[in-house]
Amino acid sequence: AVRWHFYSSAIVKEAQKFNERDFGKGARSFISLIYNSFVFLETYTTAEIRNQKLEIRNVLDKWIMSRLHETARDLTVRLDAYEIAEATQVLESFADDLSRWYLRRSRKRAEALTVLRHVLLETSKLIAPFMPFFAEALYKSLGGEKESVHMEDWLVSDNTIIDKELTDDMAEVRRIANLALASRAEEKLKVRQPLASLTVKSGALQGKQELCAILADEVNVKQVVFDETME
């Protein structure tokens, strides 16, 4: 927590007075996102799932793998430039995507647990320079093959796995979902109440059935309709 506080705060660039209220706040949030994902994995993983091979088929799995390698790429660039605070922001963004979107949208898919284990194992390597003890505990809890996470090779990003179009499309799904949920709240329509359809002006997701299915499930509508003429 101490390391993360100094790495992620403005102290890296300029002198500041120590603020006890801010101390650990960012670290606790970041650690909680990673740790909660790990707890979910351990709670629902069976011996059969633990022995399954990694298979990337679902669009959410493809997306989180793309985000993992984007994170490794961007993190490497930031660290090579000694931009430490910016590097922590890269990791925080990924942790948010992993816990608050991938995990939440994949809770009903048993096959996602194999992907989650892989992603968390690779994440432990990425956070090792920042939080060595937490990274070590995570790595060993996930059954890392080497004696220590600090003996692992750095994750080198694979451009064949990075899918910028998918990343942009998933960001659009989340943007529209947030707007739709805000409209539901404004109209006092609870999310558990299913609606017939959601009409969307943007055509970015048109024809992309898997993404539309995620959007429809997130906002609890039976179908997503596109109408670029709507105001």
Image (cartoon, rainbow, N blue to C red):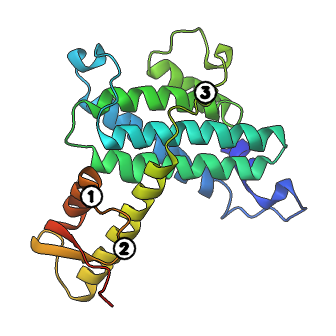
Look at the numbered disc 3 and give the secondary structure of its residue.
helix
Relative depth, front residue between 115 and 29: 115
Q: Which residue appears at 23% of the width and 53% of the height?
A: 209
- Residue 125, which numbered label? 3
- Percent coordinates x, y for residue 60 in the rendering: 34, 43
Callout 2 amino acid: Ser
Provide the residue designation for mark 2. 202
| Badge 2 element | loop
Q: Is residue 110 above or below residue 18?
A: above
Tell me the tag on residue 207.
1
Q: Is residue 181 visible?
A: yes
Q: Amino acid at mark 1?
A: Gly
Q: Nearer the viewer, mark 3 or mark 2?
A: 2
Answer with mark 2 or mark 1, whichever residue precedes in sequence: 2
- Locate residue 111 relative to residue 12 in the image: left or right: left
Residue 35 lies, with reference to residue 153, above or below; the image says: below
Q: Residue at x 53, y 27 (%)?
A: 122
169 vs 147, nearest the viewer: 169
Q: Where residue 196 appears, x then y in whole percent?
A: 9, 74
Comes first in the chain, label 3 or label 2: 3
Gap between marks 3 and 2, in whole Å? 38 Å
Q: CA distance from mark 1 to mark 3?
A: 37 Å
Of 92 and 115, the residue lying toward us: 115
The answer to whether mark 2 and mark 1 are in CB contact below 8 A is: no
Q: Position of residue 223 (x, y in %)?
A: 14, 66
Q: Are marks 3 and 2 in contact (CB under 8 Å)?
A: no
Q: Earlier in the sequence, mark 1 or mark 3?
A: 3
